[in-house]
Image: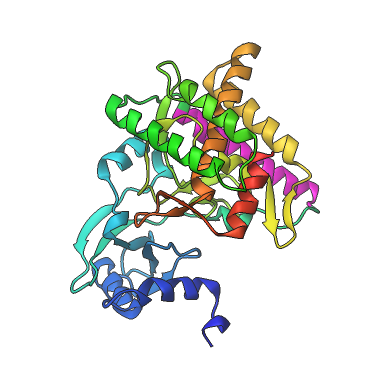
Amino acid sequence: MGMDKPWTQQAIDKFFATRESPTQAECDDHARKISGASTVQQVAVPGSLSYTVRCKDFPSVERDLIVSFRQVESSLDHGVLNLARSIHGALVPEPVFRGKMPNSNPPLLVYTMPYLPGIPCLEALASKTGLSLDEQSRHICFAKHLARYFARCWLSPQPVDPEAQADFRKRVYRQLMKFKTSPLSCTIIVELERSLPILFGQTYPQVLTHNDLSQTNILLNEESFEITGVVDWSLAGVQPFGMDLDSLLLATGYMDLNGWHNYPCRLQMLNAFWDEFWIHCQIHDDIRQREIRASAMQAAKVGAVLHYAFQRNANGSPSEELTTSKWALKTLNAMLTA
């Protein structure tokens, strides 16, 4: 009978199945209590490490509220979020920590934050190749807005702790070597390995990186495909620019049971992205543009390996165990050969 439920409810059931307490209903009641709302509804795309609801119908407040019940491993770092808001403004929701969910076992941390309008990118982008001109225009609009997001990152380089950066570089190298030994590897892994000295070099920008810039965590205006929000910053940290750029590659097509399919406007999306990026970053020299784009796309493919080739740790970050997910590996192959 469980398979008759929508996949969203199956994901929520899976989240609560591993817990002694609370239940979904108890979380809903707690959300009503702390928000003052009369209506609670689950968000469109549930997370694997949290249960998140939208609180509506307040007696006096007009704006809806989000209440998120998060595993301890997926806690939100207010310092990171303040930095994200200083870079991206209102696209990043400002959370308020509301303590631990009473009697939760294992513990759940409760956060409230403003509701951001829009639908998940996953729901907006098409799962077909036959796009009308209007649909192609909306997809290109999204690529431009994504470029502005990455331009803000580029223009806000961050200081790095040398020891932490060295540790991260070693971990990335180990993961590339682990993937290199698998039958799924390809010659590009050697190229990615060789790119690490550049990506972690002193002259290459280290920027705030979301680290889970998936199509579930980017919100879009349903009509225009402009970005209206970027949520769930629990994995964010300072990394080489472009480690999240696999989000651009993923947005230029879709995966189904028959494999990967490029959108007919894929090339226009990529060109629109980079044209917009150069404008906002005020980079006009052709040679400089080629150098930056080459390094950024290498970083994007390194990020893709980390995001898709490995199983996940308890906090959602990539482990050093190779994944067995055929969907993830097919997606990774499409991005590495793009």
Q: Is residue 185 magenta?
A: no
Quarter the N terminus occupies: bottom right
Residue 131, image x and y in percent?
78, 51
Judge whether residue 297 can be spotted in this image: no
145 or 102, which is in the foreground?
A: 102
Q: Is residue 142 magenta?
A: yes
Residue 270, image x and y in percent?
68, 34
Note whether 318 is above or below 190 in the view shown. Answer: below
Q: Give the range drawn in magenta.
A: 131-153
Residue drawn 63% across the image and 12% down it: 287
Task: Tell me if 187 is positioned left or right of 261 in this view.
Answer: left
Residue drawn 35% across the image and 77% down it: 24
Quarter the C terminus occupies: top right
Residue drawn 63% across the image and 34% down it: 188
Q: In this view, which residue lies farthest toward the bottom? A: 1
211 or 37, which is in the foreground?
A: 211
Note whether 47 is above or below 186 in the view shown. Answer: below
Task: Tell me if 190 is positioned left or right of 160 in this view.
Answer: right
Note whether 188 is above or below 19 in the view shown. Answer: above
